[in-house]
Amino acid sequence: MEFAQVVTQTRNIADTSLSVVGPIATEWMENALCFAGPPETPPAPGSRFRRTDNLLEAHS
C-alpha cells in the first residue's frame, strides 16, 4: 500500500517504511508514477500522512 501511495504522489517516501537500496532503486522511485502527466513535486514529509506505530495518521 505504501508503494502505491508514493507512486500516486499521495505520500512522501520519507513518511513510509519503504526501504530503497542503491542508486538505481533511488532513481526509479524518484521517477515512478502510475498516472499520465509530468512528474510533480511530492508532498513534503509529514504534510499528508505520517507513520506512527504502524498506523497512519492523516493531516488536514
Image: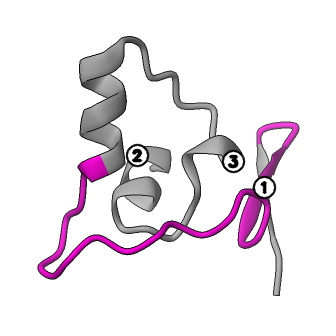
Q: Amino acid at mark 1?
A: Arg
Residue 32 horizontal side relative to residue 15, left or right: left
- The residue where tag 1 is placed is 50
Image mark for residue 3: 2
Q: CA distance from mark 3 to mark 2?
A: 11 Å
- Disc 3 on helix, strand or loop? helix
Specify the color scheme. Answer: one colour
Within the image, what quadrant is residue 48 found in? bottom right
Q: Count numbered badges in the picture.
A: 3
In the current view of this chain or complex, which residue is farthest to the top? Answer: 22
Query: What residue range appears in magenta?
Result: 31-54
Query: Nearer the N terminus, badge 3 or badge 2?
Result: 2
Give the residue at x 78% y 55%: 50
Mark 1 vs 3: CB contact within 8 A: yes
Quadrant assignment for the C terminus: bottom right
- Disc 2 on helix, strand or loop? helix
Give the residue at x 34% y 57%: 7
Relative to 60, residue 43 above or below: above
Give the residue at x 19% y 64%: 34
Residue 48 horizontal side relative to residue 38, left or right: right
Q: Amino acid at mark 3?
A: Asp
x, y percentage for residue 44? 68, 65
Magenta stretch containing residue 46, yes or no?
yes
Magenta stretch containing residue 34, yes or no?
yes
Relative to 51, residue 43 above or below: below
Image mark for residue 32: none
Q: CA distance from mark 1 to mark 3?
A: 5 Å
- The residue where tag 3 is placed is 15
